[in-house]
Image (spheres, coloured by chain):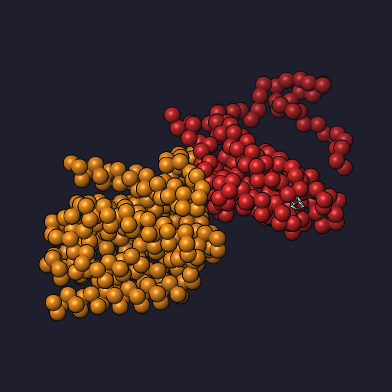
Chain colours: A red, B orange
Amino acid sequence: MYEKYRKKSPWILHYNAGSCNGCDIEILAALAPKYDLERFGVINTGNPKQSDIFLITGPVTLRSRERIVELYTQIPEPKVVVAVGSCSCTGGVFRDMYNVEDGVDRYIPVDVYIPGCAVSPELIIDGVVKGLDILEQKTKEMEKPFKLFQEATTKDGITSRRETPLRVGEDNEKN
Amino acid sequence: MIEMLLILFAPLIGGLLYGFERIVRARMQNRQGPPLLQPFYDMYKLIDKQAFIVNPYHSILGIMHFVTLWIVVAFIILGQNLLYVIFLHLLSTIFIILAGFSVKSIYSHIGANRELLAMLAYEPILIMMAVGFFMLNGSFDISIIREKEASLFPLFLLFLAYLTVIPIKLKKSPFDATEAHQEIVGGVEIEFSGVFFEFLYMAKWLEYIFVYLLLFLFAGNNILLATALFLIVFLLLNLIDNATARIKMNHLIKIVLGVGITLGMCNLLGLSYV
Ligand code: SF4
């Protein structure tokens, strides 16, 4: 009976990781009377311990990356991370600059990407509503019992009890 | 019987009132606003969330705050002594202040400090209100006050003073510096999460019930007047909340103490000479 109420109350934490403020203004526009995100029950709490959806704008600057991880760990499960704007998806216009880390997903897992240099409020609303579905899914998954390790299987000559066998000494394409 | 039911469902009634108020405020800003049952959706969600416990006393003091407030509401509904009610309410506020000081967060400390200062400002007015009712009815018992005639006109100045207390208790601008969501992120409630924040959230609903039940005392046995008072104060409160900005803590104390004590004293002096 309670299940269908779960996604009706997303509380938002909004963090500016060095954005140009364009996207922040659009987020505030989405919360303001014209678009009225509050009709979905959204509250802009500003407090990580009470929020469900983490909206991040801006390319992650060197100064802000520790704060992002810290804020992310302070949000209780279940949580959804939404990257708002081209900057936080890929780095956008700031990509490859000396003080910028090219996107949020290098530090924390991102669930929804909303592209656009200054995203439109309509897109933000769509993204948050999409995030709600993911939130519901995550809530359900939290209840399921799961095993960390499975039956031992042999794949590519490696015997392992993990889903993706750990390979030692493999080339990492990022290096 | 009906009293027992009222006491049992007091948090739910408060929740409905809070949901309704959010709609009214949204309509005043020309928005659609959340659904009426939004506070209860929030409640279900908070129960599902993981809860961080900063330290055990902090969480327990939050729950105590809720429980004492519920007892306060029960005492008013049962018609107990008005002075007891006011002092028990003071106790519930002290619990939340202690909770605020029991964690390390600086915002929590600022919030608790402001809560203390606000208490200094509104507590004398509540006590003067009780004294006013005593001088008029010869008893502090709420059940006796409720049976007498409406005391709105003899206590009109005290009623005005009480109007300044309501926004402080319900955290409404211009007197919401204790919570100040944009500056100190909710003050004392910052470190609560999950199901423990739920208790604070429900305590907020009970605060609504408490404030409006005290308001009904001015109407005495006149139910029509009580309804009218409730509607007028409810709309006025939300209108002022939407139309004004937050004022600083020291201004809050000066305004509430200055206006409230002057009005209350005038009223009490008037009562003793008439
Ligand atoms: S995506 Fe564009 S508007 Fe948004 S923060 Fe980046 S540069 Fe600014």
Residue drawn where x is 18% and y is 64% of the image: B151
In-image side of B223 versus B38 (left or right): left
Residue drawn where x is 36% and y is 48% of the image: B17
Quarter location, residue B12: top left
In-image side of A98 versus A16 (left or right): right
Q: Quadrant of the N terminus of chain B?
A: top left
Residue B77, percent from left and from top: 22, 51
Is residue A57 in view from this perspective? yes
Is residue B102 in view from this perspective? no
- Residues A40 and B117: in front is A40
Residue drawn where x is 43% and y is 29% of the image: A1
Q: Residue furthest front?
A: B30
Q: How many marks?
A: 0
Placement of B272 over or under A18, stated as above or below: below
Placement of A81 over or under B250, stated as above or below: above
Quarter location, residue A162: top right
Placement of A87 over or under B263, stated as above or below: above
Residue B195, percent from left and from top: 45, 45
